[in-house]
Amino acid sequence: MISRRGFLGTAAVLASATAVSGRVQAASIPEAPSTKTTTMQPPIFPTNGPDYQPVVTLNGWTLPWRMNGDWKEFHLVAEPVVREFAPGMKVNLWGYNGQAPGPTIEAVEGDKVRIFVTNKLREHTTVHWHGMLLPNGMDGVGGVTQPHIEPGQTFVYEFEIKHSGTFMYHPHSDEMVQMAMGMMGMFVVHPRDPKFRRVDRDFVFIMSAYLIDPGTSLPKVAEMTDFNMWTWNSRVFPGIDPMPVRLGDRVRVRMGNLTMTNHPIHLHGHRFSVSCTDGGWVPDSAQWPESTVDVPVGTIRAFDMLADNPGDWAFHCHKTHHAMNAMGHDIKNFIGVDKRDLARQVRKLVPDLDAHGKRGHGRYGRNGNAAAREHAADDDGLRPIRTN
C-alpha cells in the first residue's frame, strides 16, 4: 500500500523527456541508442571492470551504457516499432529502442545501475525487472510501487545488483496489451568472479507469441490461447539466426518465456544440464543430463553444454504446432480425401490453386523459397546450433 508521503517520494523520479529530477543530481540523460536491424549483432566486450564472456542475442543486440562515477547508466525508450518476423513479413509492435523485444541489458554482480526509461507511447507504462531482488520502489509495478510513466515522461530506476543470473524486463502497466504488443527484453548479470561457470559462447533469446490474421500487421492483444506466430526474439523461420560455435566450446543458452504457454525446448545431437533459472544458479549437485527442457510461462531456463558433436543441429520447441507456426494453424485435415474433381472446378476461377493434403501436409513446407523447401515449415525455433 502506498502512503501519500511514499507516493510523493517516488514521484520525484518522474520528469519530462528533456529533464530529470534532483535524484540523479542534474545528470544529463544518456543517449538512447536505437536500431532496426534484425541481424544478430556482435557482443560488447568489457573494457574495464570485471572480465566476463558477453552474451550474444539471437537477431538482437546489447544496449550500450556509459559510466557516470560509480554508476552504469542505460537509457530505454518505450515506443512503437516495426519488426520484421521473417523476410517479407513486417508487424507493428511496441518495443524499446527501435525493436521488439528490446535490447539485452548486461551488467555485473555488484554493479550500481541507473536506467532511464522514456515513454514515447500514447499510454502510460512502467518497467519491471523480472526475477531481480531490488528495493520495493524500483520494482516497476504501476500504481503499487511507483506512479505510471505517462507519455513524454522519463522515470529513473536506480539499484545495486545483488545477484548474478538471467532475468527479464517487461511492463507492469496495462500488461495484457503491452506485453502482447512485444514489450519485453532480457537482463543478464554476470558473476563478479570471472571464473565462476565460465563459458566460451553465451546466447540469449526471449520467446513471445502473437495472433496476426493473414493480410494484417497488428497482433490481436486480447488472445489467450489461439496464437499463430510463435517467435524467438520476434523472429520465425527462416528468419532466425543460427548459433555458431566451435567444436569443444563450452556453450550456454539462456531462454526467457513471456508467451501464454510452456515450451519443451529440444536440442538434437547433444546433452545439456539446466544451470540457471530466474531464481538463481542451479547447484551442480541438483543438475542432471537432458536433451529437452520445459520453459514454463514467465520463467527463465539456461542450460550449459559441451559442443562435442560436429554438424548443424536442430533446436526447437517440441510442441509440433509451434514448430509448424502459422503453417500449421487452423488448417483442415484432408488426408484420404480425393479432391481432384473439386480442384478442377475451382481452378477455372483460381488457376494457381494448389490443392493438397490427401497424402499429408508435407508439401506445404516444400513450396516457397529454397530455405523453406530445404527445412520444410519450421519454427517456434528449429534453429541449428552449428558446431564447426
Image (cartoon, rainbow, N blue to C red):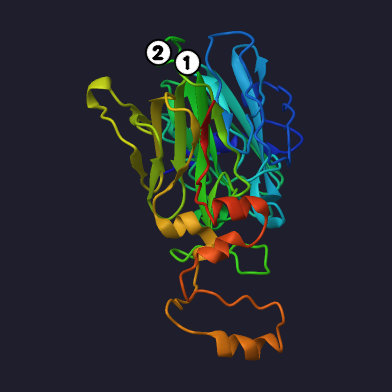
Look at 74% across and 33% down and name the residue there: 19
- Amino acid at pointer 2: Phe
Residue name at image x 52 percent, y 52 percent: 379
Residue occupying the point 43% across, 76% down:
335
Residue 31 left/right relative to 228: right
Q: Is residue 15 visible?
A: yes
Of 325 and 109, nearer the camera is 325
Cα separation between marks 1 and 2: 15 Å
Asked which secondary structure carries label 2, the reply is: loop
Where, quadrant-wise, is the N terminus in this rendering? top left
Which circle marks residue 110 in the picture?
1
In the rendered structure, the answer to whether residue 222 lies left or right of residue 370 reads left
Residue at which label 2 appears: 196
Q: Position of residue 265 (x, y in %)?
A: 40, 44
Which sits in the foreground, 387 or 243?
387
Q: Label 1, secondary structure: give it.
A: loop
Q: Position of residue 66 (x, y in %)?
A: 68, 19
